[in-house]
Amino acid sequence: MQISKLENVDGRHVIPESNTYIIDLGWYPDSSLNGEYKLVLVHVDVDKYGNELKTKRSKDRFEIRDTIEIWLRELNNNQPDDGF
């Protein structure tokens, strides 16, 4: 699953291709009962190159949820009402 901030372009919501942030969530190894969540915060620069900024691994879904909320607040300069 990926979370990306949308931009408003001519009244349409679009996913920017560069100079944006992506939060990527997966379960690794895939389909394994002994796996864990892996959460990655990526900055996609103007050259469309992704730079991993933060990584969090955990089996606890609530810890992952809390981390997503913290990262979203940080990306929004600690303004909780605007999402991302």
Image (cartoon, rainbow, N blue to C red):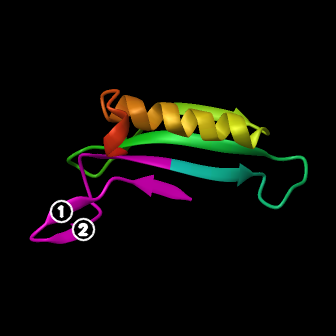
Asked whether 39 or 61 is in front, the reply is 61
What is the three-letter code of the residue carrying label 1? Asn
Q: Residue at left 90%, top 47%?
A: 34
Q: Is residue 39 left or right of residue 57?
A: left
Q: Confirm whether the magenta stretch covers residue 13.
A: yes
Q: Is residue 19 above or below residue 7?
A: above
**Answer yes or no: do the residues labelled 1 and 2 have beta carbons within 8 Å?**
yes
Mark linked to residue 13:
2
Q: Is residue 23 left or right of residue 51?
A: right
Q: Position of residue 20 (x, y in %)?
A: 29, 47
Q: Confirm whether the magenta stretch covers residue 17.
A: yes
Q: Position of residue 2 (x, y in %)?
A: 50, 56
Q: Residue at left 28%, top 52%?
A: 48
Number of marks: 2
Mark linked to residue 26:
none
- Of the 4 image quadrants, the one containing the N terminus is bottom right
Q: Position of residue 73 (x, y in %)?
A: 40, 32
- Of the 4 image quadrants, the one containing the C terminus is top left
Q: Is residue 6 visible?
A: yes
Q: Is residue 38 above or below residue 18?
A: above
Quadrant of res 66: top right
Q: Secondary structure at mark 2?
A: strand
What is the three-letter code of the residue carrying label 2? His
Quadrant of res 63: top right
Residue stretch in magenta = 1-23
Neighbourhood count class around disc 1 (C-alpha, 10 Å): few under 14, some 14–19, many 20 upward: few
Mark linked to residue 8:
1
